[in-house]
Image (cartoon, rainbow, N blue to C red):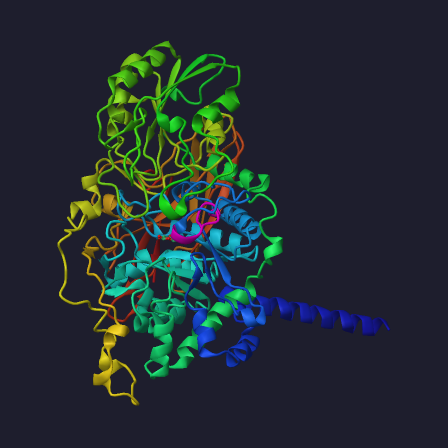
Amino acid sequence: MKRLFILATVAVSIIIVAVACAQKTTTPQQELTKHDEEINEIIKGMSLEEKVEMLHSKTIMSSEGIPRLGIQEIRYADGPFGIREEIGDMFMPKGWKLDSATYFPTGSALAATWSTELAYKYGTGMAHEAIRRGKDMILGPAMNIQRIPVGGRTYEYFSEDPLLAGALAVGYVKGVQDQGRAVCLKHYAVNNQENDRGTVNAIVDERTLREIYLKPFKAAVIEGGAWGVMTAYNKVNGFWCSENAYLNNEILRGEWGFNGMTVSDWGGTHSTMGAALGGLNVQMTGDTYLGPALIDSINIGKIPESVVDDKVREILRVRYTVKAIPEEDANIVMASQPEEQRIAYEVASKSVVLLKNENNILPFDLNKVKNIAVIGQNAVLSTAAGGMGAGIKTLYEITPLKGLQNRIGDAATINYARGYKNYVRSWGPPVPNPNNAETIDEAADPEFIAEAVKLAKEADIVLYFAGTNKSIETEGSDRENIDLPVGQDEIAQALAEANPNLVTVIISGGPCDLRKVNDLSKAMVQGWWNGLEGGNALADILLGNIAPSGKLPFTFPLKLEDSPAFALGTYPQKKEVVKENDVFVSQYRKNDIKTDSVDKEEIDFSAFFRRPVNGPDAPYSEGLFVGYRWFDSKDLPVLYPFGYGLSYVDFNYSELKTNKESYQANDVIELRFTIQNTGSMQADEVPQVYVHRINPSVEWPDKELKAFSRVTLQPGEEKTVSLEIPVDDLRYWDEESSSWQNDLCNLEFLVGTSSKDIHLKETVSLK
Ligand code: BGC
């Protein structure tokens, strides 16, 4: 009996080990194919019409399922920082009562936490609200590289660095998908400007494409296991993203093993043949291309029906994996709940970046500071709505002023003045508002200045809230420059003259030209668009309830002209560039199309090819040298470097060691070093590891981020940080062999607190 028991135990253990191994070898993408047999049976029983019905929009935010079989449609929700309110045709809000969401900190704010754990939590929060709303697929994360400082969607995106953007996207994706909802990575790919986004043709060399622009997407698909991908509006190297067979079929599905579904950006589908053969599953929105025209093209033998079957299979995989929520179970409680609001607070509290702190003016001490002047409309204006698709109908929003009032209570007097007029872009006839400016560069109003100066003179400290808003930074257009708008520099000057204790907080999603305010202010803080709890988090930092720990996810250049695309004159592009023909049209010319049964000359090809509007070419001439890769390689001074952010404590870095002196392909480099908090309060630090190649055989940027971590340290505490860098992550894309290759050279690992503040160095070799 005992023997039997032992045998049984051994057998059970073996089974457990076998199951564990089997689980280990299943990649997140393979998980998606679990129901393929059943799905294939369903497809066999579907008519062509029924299948094609699934390949285009049903409503502005859904695409069809199989009603005959009770298989629900797929319901999409913008994304990326809060589940968008219910909208109908023309994106008009339906005015529901329970669809107020948690407004989470926007992309650049989340990125400033440099925390994959927080990105994961953020994803869980988004997914829980999607579930309450009955939504299946979140249109996010938005994760393109911030190539130009003026980019309209810089605030939506994560970083100028692909490793950081990818790591955050992986966290977000896992957070969402572990709760059983799908993500839709956007915008695949090379969607780095908003001007002409619907027509621009990004011309980017293969190495740069792979190492910079595709890298975050690759991580989110392979490591994150993303189930959905949104194709971008623009073209890449001549082909619309929604029909870019190279990006969608060869790379995404072929190389990365993506088993999910692609969705075009709204209005970003351009042709039937292109979309059908170029890897698009769902046309959003409308059915012009993947609707009746697709049925025609199959009936006359231009496209094999198996192409449609593949698309349906990929959609059904997602439908089977993301459990449909019955109508009666959705929208029965308010979308935003305290659990998500707490996540929003936590992210906000770790995203705020302290840029400057002369004489430790921050945190300010309420025993000494009894009169606080809060100046600037950005202290009171909401940042949740606006910016188009990414606007949030938030349940509530703690503005900076409200946050200060909440945390300070009666301990000091807080007086507020508007400081400057607010610039609001008007789509219709302007509504007169004495608080609003007519143009973005309107000079400061003397009356507003006088009001602010009066308060500043009486105050012990002046908190000046400058920055942009969602009229200025928005989807659909880029900023013309990064200047502070509406005379904000002028107000800063007047405030500094009135009171030397000037602290400037920038409320913006992207970088601004801060040279002037920086000189005038004792302290500078980057406060972001930080979600519905942003004001509370900011107040906690200004008051020293917590130490600031955000780090810049992109460079603040001294001036815009220093940044690569501006310096090289490739952005902005000249509008008049119009080409005779479109390279896409020639991709699927008549001879590529199998039409044995039809006389090719008799076919009206205009039904299959819409001749697209030709936009400008955007040559990515800087190549790999994006963001800090450019500034550091050219040795250009910047105002605040990538990765930068101060704390209220100091950290001591020591004892960098690697596990070996020399490495080979397939090795993993292990780095260890020690950090000590030498201050008197708990604080987080974000150590960053960069690599510099010493004797390379190909061109490299001066340094590249290769690993990072976020560490919490008590006063005086010391911790050893271990980070791993697979040698594979150091490879370059060799255009000649179309493959990843090792550059066998000496590598200097640099451990620091920004791309420019390096504390430790260690050299190893790659053989
Ligand atoms: C945006 C997408 C968004 C979609 C749906 C588009 O204009 O580019 O990011 O998800 O609209 O709102």
Q: Quadrant of the N terminus?
A: bottom right
Residue farthest to the right? 1
Q: Position of residue 390 (x, y in %)?
A: 40, 46
| Position of 281 relative to 465 (above/below) | below
Asked whether residue 424 is in view, the answer is yes
82 drawn magenta: yes
Q: Main secondary structure of the magenta part?
A: loop
| Position of 520 relative to 428 (above/below) | above
- Nearest the eye: 674 or 79: 79
Instruction: Classify residue 309 as left or right of residue 577.
Output: right
Picture mark count: 0
Instruction: Classify residue 269 as left or right of residue 47.
Output: left
- Nearest the eye: 218 or 315: 315
- Nearest the eye: 325 or 59: 59
Asked whether residue 524 is in view, the answer is no
- Nearest the eye: 334 or 239: 334
Residue farthest to the bottom? 597
Q: Which residues are magenta?
A: 79-90
Residue farthest to the top? 458
55 drawn magenta: no
**Residue 323, picture quadrant:** bottom right
Q: Position of residue 79 (x, y in %)?
A: 44, 50
| Position of 420 relative to 46 (above/below) | above
Instruction: Classify residue 616 as left or right of residue 552.
Output: left
| Position of 75 relative to 280 (above/below) | above
Q: Position of residue 669 (x, y in %)?
A: 42, 55
Q: Quadrant of the C terminus?
A: bottom left
Residue displayed at 14% across by 59% down: 578
Instruction: Classify residue 399 as left or right of residue 26.
Output: left
